[in-house]
Amino acid sequence: LASLGELVAGIAHEINNPLSGVLIFSELVAKDKRLDPALKKDMEIISNEAQRCAGIVKGLLEFARDYQPHMAPCNINQVLIDSLRLVECQSVFQNVVILRELDNRLPVILADQNQLKQVFINIFINAGQAMQDLKRGELRINTRSDAELVGGVVVTIADSGCGVSEEQLGKLFDPFFTTKGTGGTGLGLSVSYGIIQSHGGSITVESRVGSGTAFIIRLPCCLADEEEGAGQIPADA
Ligand code: ADP
Ligand code: MG
């Protein structure tokens, strides 16, 4: 994934410069009075399509960005609640019951809140989309201390949606793997994977066709010295 990221970033960068030229000059020509009015539409198409390429390149650069997290002490429960608030009103959650099983004695961990939000939002939306055809879906969000890793936390996000086949399961975190056709980019989970890795954590998935999917995220404590013994914060802090 890392070398693919470098390759993508390199290509996107290289394409950006000539693309800027195409964009600028097509707009100049479009505005030039000497342009035959019959050609105006064609120039517009060139401009719009170049603009579209610029959008794709921007997306690729975002994907390939170096995920250097800005770490700060954070309350994972609060990050989950904030992320959920941003998506729960979307129509895909209309028939979904959301269960919050948040351990209010979780240790404080060092993490980049914005990046974690991005991960949780990606997973929530995927879950909603997997359940959107159900009469009643269930999204379960569970947090607990990591029994194997002192100070670490485990977040489980489980849905009762369509699930994925054994064959697809191995490809879920691959960049550009999507089953949503033009409705998906296939970047959500690969970006999430990169973010969790840069936090020193892990993300795994379990799924069964027809019964649901669960993402399990483990994050180490990595408490800074001055934060040591900072104590526990309640889920609703
Ligand atoms: P996208 O959502 O753009 O397709 P993602 O990287 O977020 O890209 O997800 C990749 C693929 O993984 C999805 O297209 C879907 O097939 C599968 N997937 C992800 N989450 C779930 C889920 N909760 N239930 C079923 N399939 C899922
Ligand atoms: Mg997605």
Image (cartoon, helix red, strand yellow):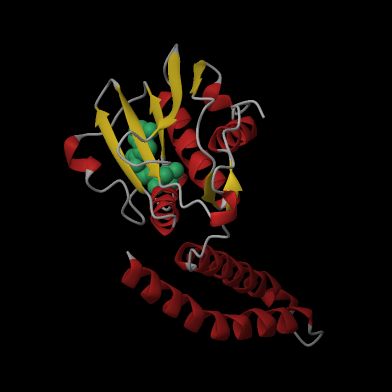
Residue 132: tell me if it is visible.
no
The residue positioned 47% from the left and 75% from the top of the image is 12
x then y, percent, for residue 91: 58, 25
Image quadrant holding the N terminus, namely bottom left
Front residue of this view, candidates 50 and 82: 82
- Image quadrant of ligand 2 equals top left
Front residue of this view, candidates 148 and 95: 148
- Say above or below: 197 vs 208: below
Answer left or right for 3 relative to 117: left
Image quadrant holding the C terminus, namely top right
Residue 88: tell me if it is visible.
yes
x then y, percent, for residue 107: 50, 37
- Say above or below: 136 vs 206: above
- Say above or below: 216 vs 69: above
Q: Residue furthest right?
A: 33
Q: Residue furthest left?
A: 167
